Image (spheres, grey):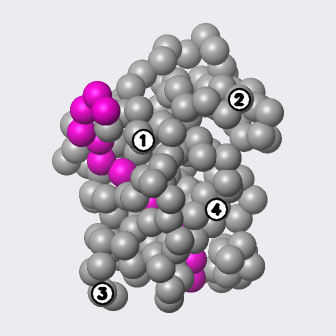
């Protein structure tokens, strides 16, 4: 799975995916959580920068294996590297609760289930956020990360509302 992503990362132009992501996010209200890319994840930072002047933008911060918290991100926000090797806003940046989350993944299926890195951060976080209010969840990936077969799921797995790739926007069971 990571091999498909790495190959796509080296060969696929992310511009169509970024344009779809920006167009999808622009009309939404409330804070938007992005992620700081690691390894060969598709990079959402151009969308973060494009929307930062009109939307509150935040990034997830790990707290061990608990649910994520989110801190405000700006171009000049002080950043540090967390225990997982991810750049996150410094503790001096205010915490915020996102209404929309852009989420990375290793793979996804037609039902918009995602395979993450196995720590369960997003599953615990989405469960907690969804208990309090409605949140919009958008997976951001390369089309090559879509699996032909359904991912096995557990009761704790949280599906996404949609996934955006260079091929467009996919909702559960939509066809390309």
Residue occupying image coordinates x 49% and y 14%: 94
Q: For the residues marked 4 and 1, what is the alpha-carbon distance in whole angstroms?
A: 20 Å
Q: Is residue 18 magenta?
A: no
**Extent of the magenta region:** 131-145
Is residue 118 placed above or below 57 in the rendered structure? Answer: below
Whichever of labels 4 and 1 marks the residue nearer the N terminus, that label is 4
The residue indicated by pointer 1 is: 126
- The CA distance from mark 2 to mark 4 is 22 Å
Q: Secondary structure at mark 1?
A: helix
From the viewer's perspective, is 131 left or right of 16?
A: left
Work out whether 110 lies above or below 27.
Answer: below
What mark, if any, has residue 41 been given in the picture?
4
Provide the secondary structure element on which disc 4 rests: loop
Q: Is residue 96 above or below residue 139?
A: above
Please tell me whether residue 90 is drawn above or below residue 30 in the rendered image.
above
Find the distance from the CA under tag 3 to the CA under tag 1.
Answer: 25 Å
Front of the two marks 2 and 4: 2
Could you say whether the residue bearing mark 2 is in a helix, strand or loop? loop
Question: Residue drawn 61% across and 11% down?
Answer: 92
Q: Which residue is mark 2?
A: 64
Q: CA distance from mark 4 to mark 3?
A: 23 Å
- Mark 1 or 2 closer to N-term? 2
User: Mark 2 Cα within 10 Å, few/some/many (few <14, many 20+)?
Assistant: few
Q: Which residue is mark 3?
A: 175
């Amino acid at each position: 799975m990571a091999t498909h992503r790495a190959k796509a990362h080296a060969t696929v132009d992310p511009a169509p995916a970024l344009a779809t992501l920006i167009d999808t996010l622009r009309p939404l209200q409330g804070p938007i959580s992005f992620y700081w890319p690691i390894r060969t994840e598709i990079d959402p930072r151009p969308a973060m920068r494009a929307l930062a002047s009109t939307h509150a933008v935040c990034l997830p911060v790990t707290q061990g294996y608990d649910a994520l918290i989110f801190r405000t991100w700006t171009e000049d926000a002080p950043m540090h590297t967390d225990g997982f090797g991810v750049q996150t806003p410094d503790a001096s940046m205010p915490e915020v609760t996102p209404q929309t989350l852009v989420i990375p993944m290793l793979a996804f299926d037609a039902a918009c289930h995602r395979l993450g890195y196995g720590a369960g951060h997003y599953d615990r976080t989405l469960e907690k956020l969804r208990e309090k209010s409605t949140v919009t969840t958008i997976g951001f990936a390369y089309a090559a990360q879509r699996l032909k077969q359904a991912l096995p799921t557990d009761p704790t797995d949280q599906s996404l509302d949609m996934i955006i790739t260079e091929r467009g926007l996919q909702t559960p069971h939509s066809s390309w």
